[in-house]
Amino acid sequence: MGVRLTNVAKSFGSFQALKDVSMEIPTGSFAVFVGPSGCGKSTLLRMIAGLEETSGGQIAIDDRDVTAVEPADRQVAMVFQNYALYPHLSVFENMAFSLRLARRPKEEVNRRVQEAARILQLEDHLPKKPSQLSGGQRQRVAIGRAIVRQPKVFLFDEPLSNLDAELRVQMRLELTRLHRKLGATMIYVTHDQVEAMTLADRIFVLKGGVVQQAGAPLTLYDDPDNRFVAGFIGSPAMNFLPAVIEAREGERVTLRLEGGDHRFETQLAGDAALGQPVEIGVRPEHLQIADNGLPVQVEVAEELGDVSYLYARTATGREIVVQRQGSRDRLDGQTVQLSATPRNVLVFDAGGARLR
């Protein structure tokens, strides 16, 4: 087992930042904590690192209770957002710093640094100072400094947020390749759900100090447990429209939208009371322009070549985003009608829980 948290809690005075968080992260997996600012994801990472004390619960690494163990003895290495490189030291010296501090033999220090530099394609930059490197190269040095320690767990705290868009894409690919080369357990914190979807084999979505859902990226995308996860995972975000349950025949349910006679259908196996107010959720790519659908007025059409996005409003003022593949029609200012197949219509109750 890689990392296991059991009923972990954290309070700052009367404020409870994390509430009974339990999770298991298998050895060799790439886990991502994702959520909005203030959800507790960075605090959780710092608690695993030992930089924050727990207010309750247990943290175990490889089945060893490390809840009260000093950070240096947990066999973890953390990569921060701001690189934290020593500007007066060379790349080699930055990467070797922790090993020299631990009084490792010179030959071992050289071997570990050279191996990390090879993995990260930094061999030609070892004599340079950080000021001579690009942002992406500096981040690779920070990762190399973690690699040389040969930790059991790598911890990443929003490491790409200081990079521009092109470099972020490049570094995401490099982190994926690095994970495959090392086969190490990695835990990554981000507020960017695109990073979470592309890097993780398991995502933990947090809100208000509580894990809302955990699972494989496409599981969270296709089968969210609640409205928050449905709206947070996916870009553009899922569309939500108020409705009521109008009719039911077996598992086939008819949903009447607010303010009119327009309806969507879906399948619900569980209890759903007639007249119950709900919200339906449909992803932008699951809406099609069709006759006898929900009329919306297109305000803006973004044409990106292979894909286009229509930003529209319903008659009641609700915003709708539609994703279309390969279309070159100019629909700005026009009224179109939208429909969705029943399997792509999700339903949430008034509290945000998913009805299935």
Image (tube, grey):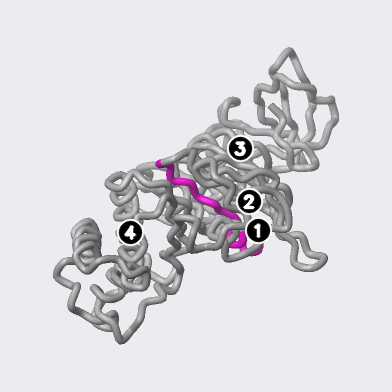
Of 218 and 237, nearer the camera is: 218
Mark with earlier residue (3, 2): 2
Q: What residue is shown with label 1? A: 39
Q: Quadrant of residue 267?
A: top right
Give the residue displayed 74% in from the left and 21% down from the top: 270
Disc 3 or disc 1, which is closer to the eye?
1
Q: What residue is shown with label 4? A: 147
Residue 73: where, in percent of width, then height? 49, 59
Is disc 1 in contact with disc 2, using a CB cutoff of under 8 Å? yes
Assign a secondary structure to mark 4.
Answer: helix
Residue 299 can be seen in this image: no
Q: Is residue 336 above or below residue 311?
A: above
For disc 4, the neighbor class at 10 Å (few under 14, some 14 to 19, many from 20) is many
Viewport quadrant of the C terminus: top right
Q: What is the distance, in whole Å, between disc 3 and disc 2 at their CAs?
A: 13 Å
Q: What is the distance, in whole Å, between disc 3 and disc 1 at their CAs?
A: 18 Å
Residue 90: where, in percent of width, then height? 25, 79
Q: What residue is shown with label 2? A: 206
Residue 142: where, in percent of width, then height? 35, 68
What span is colored magenta in the figure? 28-43
Mark with earlier residue (1, 4): 1
Which numbered circle lies on residue 224?
Answer: 3
Q: Is residue 103 above or below residue 327?
A: below
Q: What is the distance, in whole Å, between disc 4 and disc 2 at their CAs?
A: 28 Å
Total label count?
4
Q: Amino acid at mark 1?
A: Cys
